[in-house]
């Protein structure tokens, strides 16, 4: 992560607006855990000639990263079809530039796209790439809608993007649910070990450990929640994702606490460790 730049003090360009003078189309901002994402797209000659001009647009003032992607038809001919020249600048957001270049290719456009990210201090993980791609697709979609003069074109593309993001979020939540299940099982095992270390192996301490395992198994089954994911909105799915992140963080803290207690007992417990062989 590159060094965070100062947060912008100016107001961002209104969502879904196009500047008629410079032909810049701006996506709707995405806000996630203190980070913000915003994309600009243009096919005008000044930006095609000097793509870095778009990185300096006032809409991106204060952005921590200004991810640039550029695509233009090559003057060279090919028997297999048109060749294209591409360029990208990740600006510290590793792997993001090539993803935006790929979006330009998938949408079949020639132009310059810059996605700004204002980093808010919380690492988002792979979901940040979903936000970057969604913003880029929306900005490009707005330009296409303006070219086609079809009032419904923008709406159709945004619906398609929502469906794509929804599928990605559902898969992310399923992966998080599996991680929660595995970590809960690990926590239960460590709690059993801790109970045995506290009470010894010759009394009923083992039964207490089994009780803790049983209590862990009574927690909400991820499968029941997954059944309802398809009915949720994208906003609701993002809320669920944040909740899963909080749950994972809590379980990891519990595991760390139990491991510290086990280590403390092992250090002063004589030869109690033999029972684990």
Image (tube, helix red, strand yellow):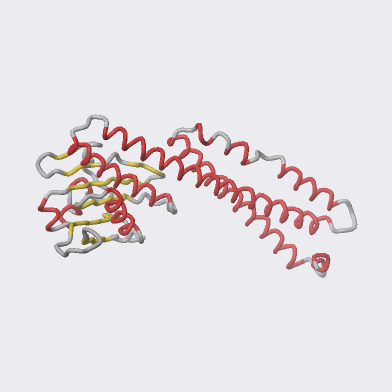
Report whether residue 250 is seen: yes
Q: Residue furthest top?
A: 151
Query: Quadrant where the C terminus lies?
Result: bottom right
Q: Can residue 11 be seen in this view?
A: no
Left or right of residue 265: residue 157: left
x, y percentage for residue 152?
A: 27, 30
Residue placed most toward the observer, 67 or 87: 87
Q: Which residue is drawn at 89% across and 54% down?
A: 203
Number of marks: 0
Q: Where is residue 115 in the image (x, y as percent from the top left)?
A: 28, 50
Q: Residue at x 29, y 42 (%)?
A: 138
Quarter location, residue 9 = top left
What is the residue that sits farthest to the right in this orientation?
Answer: 202
191 or 47, nearer to the observer? 47
193 on left or right of 123: right
Kindly identify the residue that appears in the image at 18 percent across and 48 percent down. Answer: 42
User: What's the residue at 16%, 65% (across, down)?
Assistant: 76
Q: Which of the pair 163/235 is nearer the observer?
A: 163
Q: Where is residue 225 in the image (x, y as percent from the top left)?
A: 59, 37
Residue 178: x percent and y percent? 60, 49
**From the image, which quarter does the N terminus lie in?**
bottom left
Left or right? Give the position of 183 relative to 85. right
Name the outermost residue toward the front. 79
Residue 152 vs 134, above or below: the answer is above
């Amino acid at each position: 992560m590159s060094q965070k730049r100062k947060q912008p003090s100016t107001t961002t360009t209104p969502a879904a607006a196009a500047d008629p003078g410079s032909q810049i189309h701006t996506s709707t901002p995405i806000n996630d855990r203190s980070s913000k994402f915003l994309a600009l797209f243009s096919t005008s000659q000044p930006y095609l000639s000097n793509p870095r001009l778009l990185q300096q647009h006032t809409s991106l003032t204060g952005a921590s990263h200004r991810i640039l992607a550029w695509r233009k038809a090559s003057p060279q001919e090919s028997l297999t079809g048109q060749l294209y020249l591409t360029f990208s600048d990740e600006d510290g957001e590793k792997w993001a530039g090539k993803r935006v270049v790929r979006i330009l290719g998938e949408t079949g456009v020639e132009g310059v796209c810059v996605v700004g990210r204002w980093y808010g201090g919380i690492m988002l993980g792979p979901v940040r790439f979903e936000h970057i791609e969604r913003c880029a697709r929306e900005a490009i979609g707005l330009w296409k809608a303006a070219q086609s003069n079809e009032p419904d074109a923008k709406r159709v593309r945004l619906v398609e993007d929502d469906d794509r993001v929804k599928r990605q979020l559902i898969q992310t939540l399923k992966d998080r649910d599996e991680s929660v299940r595995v970590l809960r099982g690990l926590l239960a095992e460590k709690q059993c070990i801790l109970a045995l270390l506290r009470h010894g192996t010759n009394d009923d301490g083992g039964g207490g450990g089994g009780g803790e395992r049983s209590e862990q198994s009574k927690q909400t089954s991820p499968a029941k929640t997954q059944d309802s994911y398809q009915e949720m909105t994208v906003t609701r799915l993002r809320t669920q994702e944040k909740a899963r992140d909080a749950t994972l963080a809590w379980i990891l803290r519990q595991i760390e606490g139990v491991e510290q207690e086990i280590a403390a007992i092992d250090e002063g417990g004589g030869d109690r460790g033999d029972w684990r062989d």
